[in-house]
């Protein structure tokens, strides 16, 4: 009887085992299908990421078109007391609002400005004007450097100091400025008195006000326009940022041609 009972139990278990295996196989198959679908979705996402990377690399290989100069609303700007290079009879004026501690301004001064001078200023086609825009919130030495340039300008050495300051943007302490003044041939006592008295502070702050009125919020910012009487220029074009020389060349040539038609 015991043997028969055991055999019955074994037989029953044998009959139930395929059903359990089938059930387990069904669950496993369902889980496997879900994993496959998940893998497919993951592969699709990876493929899309790879394509995005390819598109990005392709765009980086292609030379970017130079940004078009922004045309501001017609405005007049005063050139009174501003330091300028070029003949007074030039048919076009380029006004730069600059910061002696701004690295982008330094890059423009060292790389682009010499080319503009060579082709347009030295040939009498363009009057190049500098205005101050020391951004003291991020460049704590900029206002003092602007004062140094103005004080050097009192002795006819503005552009020599301009070159010194942009060539040494990481060293603009009071002692550094005194040394640059001596190296540019500025009389030291007069320079010291000018700096101590903040002789050009009001002038620099007026430049700041004029820049804000013209909608300038970063350096360097440039304005191109045609000279008018009374030391003023009618602004017709704005170029914001330290762009490569070809951007300025295109803007200057276009306006020179426009002026020639008038």
Image (cartoon, rainbow, N blue to C red):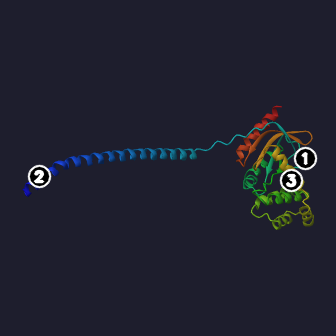
At 81% from the left edge and 52% from the top edge, which residue is drawn?
A: 133
Circle 3 SS class: helix
Query: Of circles 1 and 3, which is in front?
Result: 3
At 36% from the left edge and 47% from the top edge, which residue is drawn?
A: 35
At 83% from the left edge and 64% from the top edge, which residue is drawn?
A: 177
Can residue 83 be seen?
Answer: no
Residue sticking out furthest to the left: 1
Q: Which mark is residue 8?
A: 2
Q: Which percent across, then down, holds residue 186?
A: 89, 63
Rendered image quadrant of residue 225 = top right
Q: Nearer the viewer, residue 80 or 251?
A: 80
Which numbered disc, 2 or 3, marks the residue that appears first in the sequence?
2
Q: Which percent across, then down, holds residue 120?
A: 79, 45
Query: Of circles 2 and 3, which is in front?
Result: 2
Examine the rendered structure and indicate whether residue 17 appears above or below residue 181. Answer: above
Q: Residues within 10 Å of mark 3 (few under 14, many from 20)?
A: some
Q: Quadrant of the C terminus?
A: top right
Can residue 1 be seen?
Answer: yes
Compute the Cα span from label 2 to label 1: 115 Å
Q: Residues within 10 Å of mark 1 (few under 14, many from 20)?
A: few
Residue ID for mark 1: 80
Q: Nearer the viewer, residue 152 or 135?
A: 135
Q: Which mark is residue 204?
A: 3
């Amino acid at each position: 009887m015991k043997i028969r009972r055991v055999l019955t139990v074994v037989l029953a278990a044998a009959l139930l085992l395929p059903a359990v295996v089938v059930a387990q196989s069904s669950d496993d198959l369902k889980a496997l299908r879900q994993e496959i679908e998940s893998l497919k979705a993951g592969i699709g996402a990876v493929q899309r990421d790879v394509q995005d990377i390819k598109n990005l690399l392709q765009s980086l290989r292609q030379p970017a078109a130079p940004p078009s100069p922004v045309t501001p609303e017609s405005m007049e700007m005063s050139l009174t007391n501003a330091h300028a290079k070029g003949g007074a009879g030039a048919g076009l004026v380029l006004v730069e609002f600059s910061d002696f501690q701004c690295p982008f301004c330094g890059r423009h001064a060292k790389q682009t400005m010499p080319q503009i001078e060579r082709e347009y200023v030295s040939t009498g086609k363009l009057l190049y004007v500098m205005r101050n825009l020391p951004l003291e919130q991020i460049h704590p030495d900029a206002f003092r450097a602007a004062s140094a340039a103005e004080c050097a300008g009192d002795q006819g050495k503005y552009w020599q100091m301009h070159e010194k300051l942009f060539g040494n943007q990481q060293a603009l302490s009071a002692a550094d400025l005194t040394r640059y003044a001596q190296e540019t041939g500025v009389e030291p006592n007069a320079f010291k008195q000018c700096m101590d008295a903040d002789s050009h502070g009001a002038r620099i702050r007026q430049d700041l006000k004029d820049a804000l009125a013209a909608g300038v919020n970063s350096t360097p910012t440039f304005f191109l326009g045609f000279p008018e009487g009374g030391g003023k220029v009618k602004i017709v074009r704005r170029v914001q940022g330290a762009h490569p020389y070809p951007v300025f060349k295109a803007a200057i040539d276009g306006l020179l041609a426009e002026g020639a038609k008038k």
